[in-house]
Amino acid sequence: QVQLVESGGGLVQEGGSLRLSCAASGSIFSISVMGWFRQAPGKQRELVAVFIKGGGTNYADSVKGRFTISRDNAENTVYLQMNSLKPEDTAVYYCYCLHAPRYGSEYPYWGQGTQVTVSS
């Protein structure tokens, strides 16, 4: 079992910044993918930014140039620095990871979500 705990959400004015953190804990063997998704009211959950297998990154077009994902491998933690926030960035942000146990198949895990609200 892997637990993901997010922090750092909140209310910010348009143009402001926030930094989200997600720490993974539990019986961690190998995490191959880790990052952030978001879900706005009435919309489907969408990818924001993730570290993909091999160490690269993938960003949604809507956040490129404004958001930056980073990580601390030693602490199994990922961060999302969000700058130049827009009202359309308002959503619940979920941490995600794909964990490969020592034996068995990869399994996805989700955090509980943290609310980000951007006021105009």
Image: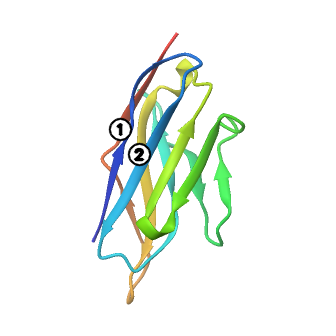
Asked whether residue 45 is in view, the answer is: no
Residue 41, position as x, y percentages in the image: 41, 27
Residues under labels 1 and 2: Cα distance? 7 Å
Q: Is mark 2 on a helix, strand or loop?
A: strand
Which residue is painted at 54% across and 28% down in the image? 17
Compared with 23, 103 (above or below) is below
Residue 13, position as x, y percentages in the image: 50, 15
In this picture the colour scheme is rainbow
Q: Name the residue under label 1.
A: 114
Asked whether residue 46 is in view, the answer is: yes
Which residue is painted at 38% across and 90% down in the image? 103
Q: Name the residue under label 2.
A: 94
Compared with 56, 29 (above or below) is below
Left/right placement of residue 55 relative to residue 6 reads: right
The amino acid beneath tag 1 is Thr
Residue 85 picture quarter: top right
Q: What element carries label 1?
A: strand
**Looking at the rendering, in which quadrant would you find the N terminus?**
bottom left
Q: How many marks?
A: 2
Which residue is painted at 44% across and 56% down in the image? 96
Mark 1 and mark 2 in contact? Answer it, CB < 8 Å: no
Which labelled disc corresponds to residue 5? none
Left/right placement of residue 90 relative to residue 66 reads: left
Q: Identify the mark nearer the N-term, 1 or 2.
A: 2
Compared with 34, 19 (above or below) is above
